[in-house]
Structures are given as structure tokens and as C-alpha cells.
Amino acid sequence: MMTLPTLDHFTADILARLPAASGWEVQKFMVTSPAVLAAALEWTDDPSRDAIWFEFCWPPFPAMIEATDFGGRRVIVRVHRIEAVETPYVANTAWAKVDDVIVVSPDMRKRVLSAAPELNFVSRVHVVSNGVDVDRFSGAVNWNRFRIGWCGLMTLRKNPTLALQILFKLRAIDQRYQMRFCGMAGDAFAGEMFWYSAERLGLSGAIAWDGNIAQSDMPGWHAANGMLLHTSFHESFGYAIAEAACSGCDIALLDHPGAETTWPATTIFRSIDEAVDMVLNAAPGRWRTFVINHHSLDAQIRKLSEIIADVSAPSAYEASGLVMPDLITSAI
């Protein structure tokens, strides 16, 4: 598995569990120089059965894929939101050299295929949602309906000022409502606007910024909330939503493209009034079973094991019998 120093945060559980589930030996290679890929190619010394997994379609990986002769080794790329939606990297990757592409939601599959329509012909595209280790989240033992959680980067896409508008209306009904924010710093302007709005709405005393909470402490943070309010304009999956739901916290998320392909329709709000109503009617433990059934780590590992075990199936391009130049012409 090829990873990058700042983009390996989704790999720990996979690296820990995939070997036992699949029977494959899995090793992580943190790419800091071209020599790391050479070492990975040397380690995967049986091209007839070995594979190289690129985690994120992010520089320098697209250039590496284009420049490398993989000698028959299977190539897998997992694509996340930022590469397909906010950058040109998915559109500019040599997908004819990639056997399998993994995305985390049906919406991301659609977006990746829109950015690189040739994938319909040259690679297999698999939807495997992120997996939550449900055993880490035992339930909302400290559930508090008046404590609302918000989790994410302080960026315009995460839309934190909408959460303030919802909190303002809630406190007009009951002054006991409070909001806890956790996450890392993001866009300076988004942060400036957030704190400006909080002061102007008179909410400074009703909010707390908990900062970047360690992953080991997230189960307790979620379990103390009555509701996770998720205001993002778009998510590839929404890992914090799954963690909160598995903790027994209720969830309410802003309607955004692809939301209903991943989450129950009754968890989605389209207006401030709808969000307020959902918070007022929050209940503990509503969605834990849903996460266990649809987004558990066990299910993710099982699906990934099935994908890497399917070494004999030809790619869609190979099965089609198309000639690549004709494919490119027709796609254009």
C-alpha cells in the first residue's frame, strides 16, 4: 500500500485487518522519494499475483502511475473526494494502467466517472464505504439532548455558520441548547465569519471549540452529544456521521448531492426549520444498527478482501475488446 505522509489517515484499520481477512501479506510504503516505489516493486516480486495499492489519487501518484512499468502487477487506486471534485488529478491519471478503482459512495462513483469517463472501459470501479469499528462505540451513556455536536474542518464547504443559525433558533425555544465544535483549523475567512456571526447572534457563551480531538477520544465526545449536526455542502461519505450514529448520538445532516445514497432520508434536513425540528425530537440510539448493517469496518474489510481476491476477472477494458485510441475518440 503506497501512502503519503499527510494522507494516510484512512489506512490504519485496513492495514491491521486486511491480512487476516484476505490471506494476503500487506505492507505499507510511505512515499517520500521515488526510491520508495522501487522498493515496493521489488517487494511485490511475483507480478502474476501481487498488487500495488495507491491510497489517494494525489501527487506524485498520478505521475508515478503514468511513468511506471508495473510488469503485470495489479494496480489499485482508492480515490477520495478532493481528487475528483476539487482538483484535476482524477481527470489526468493514466487509468488504462489501473485495474481497480475504489470509491466510498455511489455519489463519488458518479463524480469519478464524470471526471474520467474512460474508467467505464479501462478499469473496474468499486464502491466500498468507509468502515467504522463498531466495537469502539458502545452507545450514548451520557446522552444529553441539549448538547449538539459539530465536527469538521472550519472551511466554507463545511458551512459552520449554518449551525449557528440553527442554534440561534433552538435557543429562542430553550436556552439550555449548547453546541460543541471539534476539528482542525481550516480556511481563515471561514473561521473569521464563524466567530463574527457567533458574537453578532449572541451565541459566544453557548458554543465551545474543543479543537482537534484524538481519535481515541472521539467515542466519548460523540456519546455525550444528543445530536450531531452536519452542515457540509458535500461529503464523499461523512465518517463523523457514521461515528456519531454508532455512538448512539442522533444525526441531522444538510441535504447535499449524494446524501440519500448513503444515509436514511429521515436524517436529512433541507431548511433551518427542519433541522430545528429534528433536534427538538432527537432520540438516543436511533441509527447504531444502521451503521452496523451498512458501514461497519467488518463489512468494509470483507468487501476489500473480495476485490483483491478477484485476481482473474478482466478489467472492463480487457473484456470489451476495444482498442484504446478508438475509445478515446468516442469518449471525446
Image (cartoon, rainbow, N blue to C red):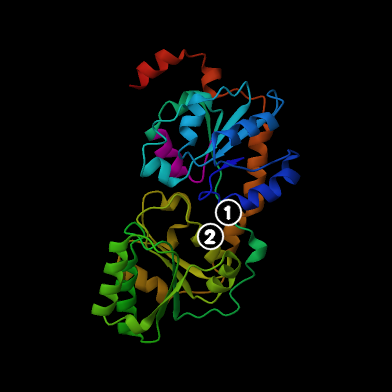
What residue is disc 1 on?
295
- Label 2 Cα neighbours within 10 Å, binned few <14 / some 14-19 / many ≥20: many
| Residue 98 at least partly seen | yes
- Label 1 Cα neighbours within 10 Å, binned few <14 / some 14-19 / many ≥20: many
Q: Is residue 228 left or right of residue 132?
A: left
Q: Residue at x 26, y 73 (%)?
A: 196
Cα distance in 3D space between marks 1 and 2: 7 Å
Nearer-the-camera pick, 231 or 95: 95
Q: Secondary structure at mark 1?
A: loop
| Residue 166, horizontal then vertical, whole percent | 32, 73
| Residue 220, horizontal then vertical, whole percent | 58, 73
- In the displayed structure, 110 sits above or below 173; it is above
- In the displayed structure, 248 sits above or below 120; it is below
Which quadrant does the N terminus fall into? top right
* Quadrant in the picture for residue 50: top right
- In the displayed structure, 70 sits above or below 237; it is above
Q: Which mark is residue 84?
A: none
Amino acid type at image mark 2: Ala
What residue is disc 2 on?
242
